[in-house]
Each structure stands twice: as structure tokens, then as C-alpha cells.
């Protein structure tokens, strides 16, 4: 097996929480424990191969940012080991690494140098950082005058222009307009296709399921699920839906359960009439709804909606012109 | 009842099918089903949910 681009094994992180600042000193002097341990991560393991994109999901406080900080080298693990061979660039807390009093250019120089680039490499990368960040005259102004979106653009431009081996992104797409988000995603794909490895954390499950190869779901500092990104996202969505009220798919519409009409099944087929659950863009897509009505004289109407798991409706259809004619007692499958 | 989409306009992702049956005015919904999911796979990733045919023309 080839050496991974990033690997972490049994990573645990325990923070000590003291009721008062003085308790820290009292603990040292007396030797008696004055803190409460808070377990941010417990025995978390994983590995990424070169060129892979891994998504990290979970609720707030689940340990995502702690894991990313450990892998980025900004905080040590309490126990466990990790290996990140090569150059690492990260966007962790938005703009937190920038010095507010110096200009965007000076911050870019400093950040690029901190990733291990030589002065010549930094000078070579700077025009690309400036062009990508689209800050205009603000590039020469102190970062304290930047909006959050401008800070993010600069951070993203620096982190990706230095051509790192591993990129760690914590909610890097949460700020910025749609056009810039697209630009960032294109850059991420460029990095991926050039063999870079990306560890990506986001609450936007659409991004995780569509452009990550693998995903890890953290829950209370533990790995709740890991593997294929779409499968892990699905498990996480089911967990969130159940938490919201016990239903797999939350809906404002009461379950009619046989009041006048019942939907018996919904099945999907391709153009050849084969039942399928996987399609490609541009494929013929056929949905067959079997339903039963109690009273053939009562007209009914069928509706169909296709949405993403996070409830963005993609398209809808209804049977207004035809259902009245077809409605009859018993199962109807036209 | 069968609904046919000749050319699925969706990009890569996971999708859920919701089916409802209601009265002819759609004011009363009698039943629903939402346990069908499907996946769209594509080797090419593009931003956005939809994959639509686009034609560019140079004008002027």
C-alpha cells in the first residue's frame, strides 16, 4: 500500500476547563485536580490517499474544528499520532491568522512564508494571490478594513496559491458570493486533479456529497460513520431528521394513511423500463406512482416533487390534466 | 400513473422523490410517500443543482 497523503490514528484531545483562572495555579501548587476534563475528540482515526477529497461533517461541538486544527499543526493532540508529509496549507478560523494592522499584501507574504516557501517562491505566488483574491486597492490596505468576505478571499487565495500537498479547509465556502464560491470550487478541483489532497469541513452537505470521495461524521468527538461521502451524508441526514422529530423526512403534510386515497408505491425506471436508483445527467427518468382511491367518483390529483436531502426543490409535476380521467377505484398504474 | 422526464436535468448528487395524492384542488392532501431516493452520478462536477443545455451565441 502506498504511503497516505494524510493519516491520523487514535487522535484524542482533552481540554482542561478551570472554574476560575486561579485554579490553574492552585492545581500546580497543591497537586490537586481543579479542572474538569472536556473530551473534544476520542480515538479518531482516518487516512487519505494522494489526490483524494475527504469531507468532515457533524454538529457544532462535535470536534470537527479541533481535528482540523490538530492536522494543521496549530494544536497538539492529547494522545494519538498523525502524519502529514509535505506542505500543508489551511484555512481554519476565518482570517484569524492575519495581522489586522498590516496590508493584505504583507499578510499574504507572511502566510506564504509560513507554509515554508522561499522568498523567490513567495514572490512568484504573490501575483496569483492578488488576482485570485480580487481585492483591488484593498490589497494594499490593512486587513482590519476588510469585510469577512474579503478576508476569506485572501485566506483562500494564499492557502491554494502556494500549491500545498495537503489543503485543510474549515467552512471555507461559507463566506463569499455564489460566483466566488464557484471560483473556489474550481480551484479545489484543480488542486485535486493535480494530485493535491483536500480535507474539507462544511455544514453544506450538498458540497460534501457531491465533491468529496470520502466523508467522516463526527458526533460528540467520536467517529459516528465514515466511508463513501454520499452514504455518510445520508446517515447524518437521517440522524438530523430523527432528532428533529422522529421522522425520517420531516413534512408539514399529515400522513393521510388511507383517507380517500393512498399511495401504494413509487418506483423509478430508465427508458428501457428497468427499475433503477442511479442515473446520469441527461438520462430518461420515469417515475411510476401506484395509488388507490376509495371512491372512483371523487377526482384526485397526483403531485411529484424531486428535492435534495436538504430540501431544495429541483422540480415538481402534477397530474392536473389527466388524473381526473384516470382516477378510479383500485390500483392505478398507467 | 407514470411521469417521464425525457432528459434528466440534474447534476451529480442524491435526490428524494416526494409523491402526494390530494383532491382536485390540491387543498386537501390524502397521502404522501417519500421513501424513494435516487442518485445522479457524473464524472464531471459543475456547480449548481441543474444540468441544462446551453447555447452560446456571439451577438453584436
Image: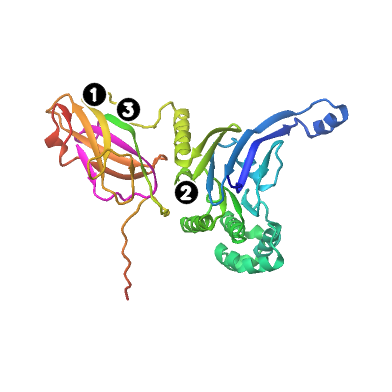
- Which quadrant, please, contains the C terminus of chain A? top left
Q: Residues within 10 Å of mark 3 (few under 14, many from 20)?
A: few
**Residue at mark 3: chain:** A
Q: Which residue is mark 2?
A: A211
The nearer-to-camera label among 2 and 3 is 2
* The magenta stretch spans residue B27: yes
Q: Quadrant of the N terminus of chain A?
A: top right
Circle 3: element type: loop
Q: Is residue A134 above or below residue B49?
A: below
Q: Which quarter of the figure has residue B21?
A: top left
In the foreground, B20 or A146: B20
Which residue, as the protein is rendered here, is positioned at the far right? Answer: A29
The crowd level at tag 2 (other Cα within 10 Å; few <14, some 14-19, many 20+) is many
Choose between A113 and B24: the one closer to the eye.
Answer: A113
| Residue A63 visible within the image | no
2 and 3 marks on the same chain: yes
Whole-Å distance between the Cαs marked 2 and 3? 35 Å
Name the subunit of mark 2.
A
- Residue at numbered disc 3: A254
**Who comes first in sequence, dot 1 or dot 2?**
2
Q: Nearer the viewer, mark 1 or mark 2?
A: 2
SS for dot 2: helix
Q: Which residue is at 55% across, 55% downward?
A: A195
> Height in image: A196 above or below A295?
below
**Residue A154 magenta:** no
Residue of label 1:
A259
Alpha carbon of mark 1 to alpha carbon of mark 2: how far?
A: 42 Å
Amino acid at each position: 500500500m502506498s504511503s497516505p497523503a494524510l493519516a491520523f490514528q487514535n487522535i484524542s484531545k482533552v481540554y482542561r476547563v478551570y472554574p476560575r483562572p486561579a485554579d490553574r495555579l492552585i492545581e500546580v501548587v497543591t497537586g490537586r485536580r481543579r479542572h474538569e476534563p472536556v473530551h473534544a475528540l476520542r480515538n479518531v482515526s482516518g487516512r487519505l490517499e494522494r489526490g483524494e477529497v475527504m469531507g468532515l461533517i457533524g454538529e457544532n461541538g462535535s470536534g470537527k474544528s479541533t481535528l482540523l486544527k490538530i492536522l494543521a499543526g496549530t494544536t497538539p493532540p492529547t494522545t494519538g499520532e498523525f502524519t502529514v508529509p509535505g506542505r500543508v496549507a489551511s484555512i481554519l478560523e476565518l482570517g484569524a491568522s492575519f495581522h489586522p494592522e498590516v496590508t493584505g499584501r504583507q499578510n499574504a507574504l507572511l502566510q506564504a512564508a509560513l507554509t515554508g516557501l522561499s522568498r523567490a517562491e513567495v514572490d512568484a505566488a504573490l501575483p496569483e494571490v492578488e488576482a485570485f483574491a480580487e481585492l483591488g486597492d484593498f490589497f494594499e490596505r490593512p486587513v482590519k478594513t476588510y469585510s469577512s468576505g474579503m478576508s476569506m478571499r485572501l485566506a483562500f487565495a494564499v492557502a491554494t496559491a502556494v500549491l500545498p500537498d495537503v489543503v485543510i479547509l474549515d467552512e471555507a465556502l461559507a463566506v463569499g458570493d455564489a460566483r466566488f464560491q464557484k471560483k473556489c470550487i474550481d480551484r479545489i478541483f484543480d488542486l485535486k486533479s493535480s494530485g493535491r489532497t483536500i480535507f474539507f469541513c462544511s455544514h453544506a452537505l450538498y458540497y460534501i456529497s457531491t465533491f468529496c470521495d470520502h466523508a467522516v461524521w463526527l458526533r460528540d468527538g467520536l467517529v459516528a460513520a465514515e466511508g463513501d461521502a454520499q452514504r455518510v451524508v445520508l446517515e447524518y441526514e437521517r440522524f438530523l431528521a430523527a432528532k428533529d422529530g422522529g421522522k425520517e423526512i420531516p413534512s408539514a403534510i399529515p400522513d393521510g394513511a388511507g383517507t380517500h386515497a393512498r399511495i401504494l408505491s413509487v418506483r423509478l425506471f430508465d427508458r428501457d423500463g428497468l427499475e433503477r436508483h442511479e442515473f446520469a445527467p441527461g438520462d430518461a427518468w420515469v417515475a411510476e406512482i401506484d395509488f388507490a382511491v376509495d371512491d372512483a367518483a371523487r377526482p384526485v390529483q397526483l403531485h411529484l416533487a424531486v428535492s435534495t436531502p436538504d430540501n431544495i426543490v429541483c422540480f415538481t409535476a402534477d397530474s392536473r390534466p389527466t388524473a381526473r380521467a384516470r382516477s378510479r377505484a383500485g390500483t392505478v398504474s398507467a | 400513473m407514470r411521469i417521464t422526464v425525457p432528459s434528466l436535468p440534474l447534476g451529480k448528487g442524491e435526490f428524494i422523490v416526494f409523491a402526494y395524492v390530494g383532491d382536485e384542488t390540491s387543498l386537501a392532501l390524502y397521502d404522501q410517500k417519500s421513501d424513494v431516493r435516487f442518485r445522479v452520478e457524473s464524472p464531471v462536477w459543475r456547480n449548481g443543482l441543474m444540468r441544462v443545455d446551453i447555447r452560446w451565441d456571439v451577438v453584436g
